[in-house]
Image: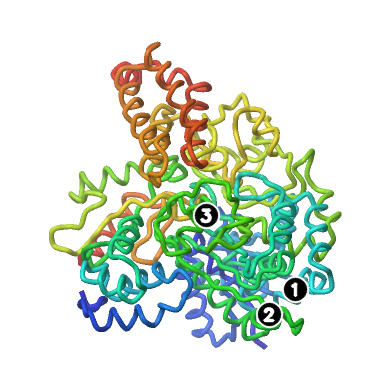
Amino acid sequence: MSIRLYIPLDTSARAVGADRVAKAVVAAAADRGVDIDLVRNGSRGLYWLEPLVEVETSAGRIAYGPVTPRDVAGLIDAGFLTGADHPLRIGNIESHPDFARETRLTFRRVGLIDPLSLPDFEAHRGLNGLRKALALAPIEIIDQVIRSGLRGRGGAGFPTGIKWKTVAETRAERKYVVCNVDEGDSGTFADRMVLEGDPFMLIEGMIIAGLAVGADKGYLYVRSEYIDAFRVLEKAIAIATDAGLLGRSVMGSGKTFELEARLGAGAYICGEEMSLIESLEGKRGVVRAKPPLPAHAGLFGMPTVVNNVQSLTAVPYILGEGPEAYEKFGQGRSRGTLIVQLTGNVKRGGLFELPFGISIREVVEGIGKGTRSGRPIRAVQVGGPLGAYFPESLFDTPLDYEAMAARGGMLGHGGIVVFDDTVDLASQARFAFAFCAHESCGKCTPCRLGAVRGRELMDRIIERGAGPVETEMLQDLTTVMTDASLCALGGLTPLPVMSAFKHFPEDFQRAKALRSAAE
Amino acid sequence: MARHRRWDAALAKQMALRLADKEGALLPILHELQATFGYIDDRAVSVVADVLNLSKAEVVGTISFYPDFRSSEVGETVIRLCRAEACQSVGCEHLVAHLKDTHGIEVGRTTSDGRLTVESVYCLGNCALGPSILVEEQPFGRVDTTLLDELIAEARR
């Protein structure tokens, strides 16, 4: 009988050598005449332990990590194929304290199963949500999503069920479901992990959305930087189509739903839903003014649901286990779980699915164990390039939509980037403007020109320090961008800039020459 | 440049025709052209415009909007270096400086021998294990100057 081993195909695991470890394991096993069955799974999300190798033994799955190709021979000789002791032995990864504290609803299968095995997916409660949805009327599906309290995970936090209801109630000859997989925010990778680790879950969520709103075609718009994840997704769509999950009659129900994955082309702005729609139509990704909302006139002028990966992947759980099972987690108006991605200068980074309400401090200190550099944490940026910089004094803020907004920040897509005390927040503010200038679609003036003026202004502040004139200009410019930009790119760029200015004024007030003299 | 084919108008037209029935076919066609030829030749504009019944301005406008679409051939190896916040926090700008100071390589350019192109990218989704780079399609994490030196040497070999 062959021994089953798991080594992730996840991009981050591959970035630290998972492919080389897999090769070494296969070669070493062949040398010793051991028959192994190697599964390339998704990552468990504890990235500091990658490459993580798991072995299926009579005592359950035993993990070893981080494994290098050089460790492999020693591991085999020590008997790791039967779960024997070794300095790299972690034991059952699900008992690891950082994994055990998680509440895995959406990510319950990621890392556990073979991402492209439909039987494996079904054996772990896959398709339960879809089966239930097929027995319900569209309005009943929508009602369950509304009752779960699920809010859009792309950043805006709009209730998913209400969005679906609007599309369902709009009459049209065709409707679309579009999944936004243009996960461009620095500090986030949850969508990539879904594509690489459990793509059938996303397909299941999209089919349910299609049934709910009456759409028979769905598109997934994947950023081109995720080329490997895109390929896994394409394979999953082909397998799901062959199995009759997708196509003219979803699971024999007589209802049609087809899916197609499309690649973006390097434009961050295409994560904005209107520009994503333009891009899917084959045009420049220029933001469209709202109204009309995409729910009324979206892709090719038809009613369109545009949802984030994390919104759609929460749906199979909600339908399968019931809205109450989801709604019971979280606090206030933030229900269910938050997919925290802990990144940057952090000792133990990764993905952690936790109920809303855990504090920033719990995450960066409790789970992250401080910086990788070993220096003190000075700032975190929460919610991507358009999210605020928070100082240590705000680390007790709970991670939920309202609490973050009350302190001038936002959750965004759940990414947290940690910076140590060598960070210069004036430079980070400059970068926020420069990024906006680089990525602006050019449609509205506050974003197109404001970002360039902002970058110039920050150059001046970094050179000479912010006097009363510069301060007033900065406030004036960011107010105009906030109030008058067409979309979130220009509208939220002031968030990182002004949070840095407010919480780290010392970085803006000393000129460069003085600062370097002091160091 | 064995990995890419030389410009071939008949082949380009054939590729465009094959994908023309898709809704919003322009981006898939452009991706296909670039994957085949390594860049999107100016001569492709009228071919694609013709097949999709678009104006040349619409095709040029779309090509020029997206950073991915290149108008000329790139180096034999393309290295994409992430310069977004998560990689900034672990020193990606030191790598940019190292490339320039030690190797004379400017990010955003192709080396004069045509062997190597280094581009900036804003997030590769490997933010817990940065700094991150992508050499062609192979990701590398926790990149330091030693690893970078090895990868550059390999690309130039």
Lower sequence index among marks 1 and 3: 1
The answer to whether residue A195 is above or below residue A293 is below
**What residue is rendered at 31% in x and 21% in y?**
A512
Coloured how? rainbow
**Residue A294 in sight from this viewpoint:** yes
Residue B12, quarter of picture:
bottom left
Q: Would residue A450 be found to the left or right of residue A139 on screen?
A: left
* Marks 2/3: CA–CA distance: 26 Å
| Callout 3 secondary element | loop
The answer to whether residue B123 is above or below residue A462 is below
* Marks 1/3: CA–CA distance: 25 Å
From the image, state whether disc 2 or disc 1 is nearer to you: 2
Q: Which residue is mark 3?
A: A183
**What residue is rendered at 68% in x and 74% in y?**
A56
| Callout 1 secondary element | loop
Q: Nearer the viewer, residue A146 or A461?
A: A146
Q: Which residue is mark 2?
A: A245
Going by the numbered disc 1, the residue's amino acid type is Leu
- Residue A153 position, x and y percent, is 64, 50
The numbered dot on residue A127 is 1
- Residue A257 position, x and y percent, is 65, 75
Quadrant (top left/top right/bottom left/bottom right) for the C terminus of chain A: top left
Q: Residues within 10 Å of mark 2 (few under 14, many from 20)?
A: many
Lower sequence index among marks 2 and 3: 3
Q: Residues within 10 Å of mark 3 (few under 14, many from 20)?
A: many
Using the image, name the chain to which the residue with label 2 belongs.
Answer: A
Same chain shared by disc 2 and disc 1? yes
Residue at far top of view = A468
Quadrant (top left/top right/bottom left/bottom right) for the N terminus of chain A: bottom right
From the image, state whether disc 2 or disc 3 is nearer to you: 2
- Residue A97 position, x and y percent, is 72, 50
Same chain shared by disc 1 and disc 3? yes
